[in-house]
Amino acid sequence: MPKMIFVNLPVTDLKRATAFYEAIGAVKNPQFCDETASCMVFSETIFAMLLTHDKFRQFTPKPIADAKTSNQVLLCLSADSRNDVDDIVGKAEVAGGTADPSPKEEFSFMYGRSFEDPDGHMWGVNWMDLGAAPTQPAMA
């Protein structure tokens, strides 16, 4: 079985958040959904679990950060092309997100943009041509 990642995100409006992630290309898996959670599938190995605040609190005693004013994690999805990067960010904006809260990244071998979902969670979307990437970590 391949390693999978489940990103758990607290959301203030589950229906709105579900519609947003569907609009950018994730598919809802009803097997793991109820009135407190939506399982959004990006690929065979990448899932976003959208959880109401009450549900999210069942997993941690720590307070839920306001993702619109603070940041704990930056999430990033890969894309198949530069056009796919632009397409995903465009869909995010049309669906109620904010396009490009972070500066665009543009190199000969890599192109990246970002979006923020309606709850303030930041996502990067990047395309990379690994064959053209520098062999030394010059970007560090």
Image (spheres, rainbow, N blue to C red):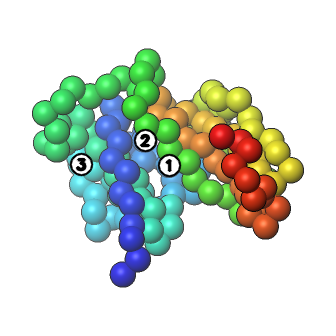
- Label 3: which residue? 35
SS state under label 2: helix
Q: Quadrant of the C terminus?
A: top right
Left or right of 50: which side holds 99?
right
Give how far apart the Cα atoms at labels 3 and 1 are: 16 Å
Q: Which mark is residue 17?
A: 2
SS state under label 1: helix
Give how far apart the Cα atoms at labels 3 and 2 are: 12 Å
Between 31 and 115, which is closer to the camera in this rendering?
115
- Label 1: which residue? 21
SS state under label 3: loop
Please indicate, yes or no, whether residue 86 appears anywhere in the rendered image: no
Residue name at image x 55 percent, y 48 percent: 76
Give how far apart the Cα atoms at labels 2 and 1 are: 6 Å
Residue at the outermost right position: 108
Left or right of 72: which side holds 114?
right
Q: Quadrant of residue 134?
A: bottom right
Front: mark 3 or 1: 1
Q: Are marks 2 and 1 in contact (CB under 8 Å)?
A: yes
Q: Amino acid at mark 1?
A: Tyr
Left or right of 2: which side holds 106?
right
